[in-house]
Amino acid sequence: MGGRSEPARSAGAANSRRPAAPPAGAEVVAKAQRRKFTTEYKLAIVEEADRATDPGEIGSLLRREGLYSSHLVEWRRLRAAGALSALSKKRGRKPARNPLAEENQKLKAQVARLEKKLQQAEIIIGFFRWYNHEHHHSGIAMLMPHMVRDGFAAEVLDNRQRVLTAAFQQHPERFVRKPPRPAPLPDAVWINPPKPGPREPRETH
């Protein structure tokens, strides 16, 4: 009979499972390899990111280097923990902890936060100094808030009246309607005036 023997059939099945050889001249794509980063490279990237101040600068850095934000987050976390040598993630014995270095990093971070808060406080204090002691407000007769608060408003308005009266006496032709008077100080000033309440119903007889 024309049937094949058992060894021949086994050899044919084995050959059918083998991957076909690429045709001649075909381009062979190299297998992608996982990128490896040295400790110096990682530290340099973290320090460059720390120096970035403009919006989008960190994103440009990551795109330039072909990195993800997760890389930067992980490397910063390790640096903040003082495990600088752990950035290389080498196998083997773990590096010994350095409590002084860790405490130093924590203190540096705390100092940076306090300096930022101090700058914010200085901006706020400077604004209130200008608002209360330098700016003349039209809503309070062109006075400064500290004049009204400290009881100098009447004295300042009297001085203004004397200056205006002297100017009127010297050049009355410049004041065609009536003698000048400074703006009066209002009884109350509101930034957001309260809304009037509902009217009470009238009594009917």
Image (cartoon, rainbow, N blue to C red):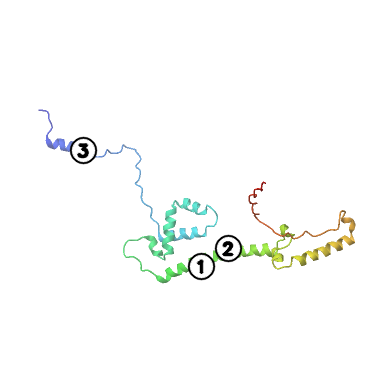
First along the sequence among labels 3 and 1: 3
- Residue at 44 percent across and 64 percent down: it is 80
Can you tell which of label 1 and label 2 is closer to the viewer? 2
- Identify residue type, mark 3: Asn
Expressed as whole percent of the image width and height from the top left, the position of residue 189 reads: 69, 58
> SS at mark 3?
helix
Q: Are marks 3 and 1 in contact (CB under 8 Å)?
A: no
Residue lying at the far front of the rendered structure? 205
Q: Which label sits on residue 15?
A: 3
The relative height of residue 69 versus residue 125 in the rendered view (above or below) is above
Q: Secondary structure at mark 2?
A: helix
Identified at 43% across, 57% down, the residue is 73
Residue 197 in the image, given as x and y percentages of width and height: 63, 51
Q: Is residue 181 left or right of residue 102?
A: right
Mark drawn on residue 120:
2
Count of labels in the image: 3
In this image, 180 relative to 71: left or right? right
Extreme residue in the top direction: 1
